[in-house]
Image: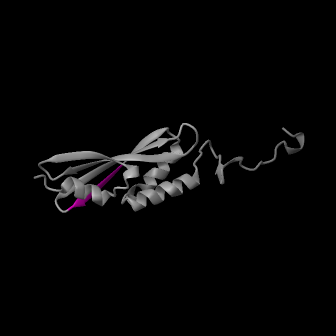
Amino acid sequence: MNPNCEGRFLPVPYQTIGFVKTTILNSTIMNNENYEYLKDQLTMTGFSGVVEQLKDQMLQGETGFQLTHQAKYGEKEMNYTLNFRQSTKSDMYFFNSYVASLSDGKNNVSTTFYADQRITAKEAFNHLGWPVC
């Protein structure tokens, strides 16, 4: 350390990752560009209600996490479990899949949808709620 700087407040260190500057503050790191991308992805697929949960989970820095979302369509209730995973090579998180479960009080049915299928929450409901012949 430079003796001329002793006792002075130094600026918060940061590191550059691609074009994104990630601030290190109290050991919390979050890639803002990645967060904005995931926020847009969730909004477009009908999961805007979990955006704040997403930010909280990303700030924790876990290697993977799940978010839950509920919606009612008439008498039917949908429960969604969204799965996220952090890359092993960078600080980027990816929305991998979600499990959609439909309950009408009597019957329960669920299936997994992968993010690259681009199935919205409402489309998942339509898929699961379609009468089976």
As displayed, is residue 130 above or below residue 95? Answer: below
Does the magenta portion include 72? yes
* x and y, in percent, of residue 61 in the image: 53, 41
Q: Is residue 82 visible?
A: no
Q: Position of residue 11 (x, y in %)?
A: 75, 50
Residue 112, quarter of the rendered image = top left
Q: Position of residue 115 (x, y in %)?
A: 39, 50
User: Which of these two is toward me, 45 or 81?
Assistant: 45
Taking the image as shown, residue 126 lies to the left or right of residue 58, namely: left
Asked whether 42 or 2 is in front, the reply is 42
The quadrant of the rendering that contains the N terminus is top right
Is residue 10 visible in this depiction of the protein?
yes
> 108 or 7: which is nearer to us?
108
Is 77 rendered above or below residue 1? below
Q: Nearer the viewer, residue 77 or 112?
A: 112
Seen at 37% across and 52% down, the residue is: 117
Q: Say how many tags the image has.
A: 0
Magenta segment: does it hold 125? no
Residue at image location 11% in from the left, 49% down from the top: 106
Left or right: 75, with 69 as reference point: left
Residue at image location 32% in from the left, 57% down from the top: 121
Residue 22: x and y, percent? 64, 50
- Which span of residues is magenta-colored? 68-73
Q: Main secondary structure of the magenta part?
A: strand
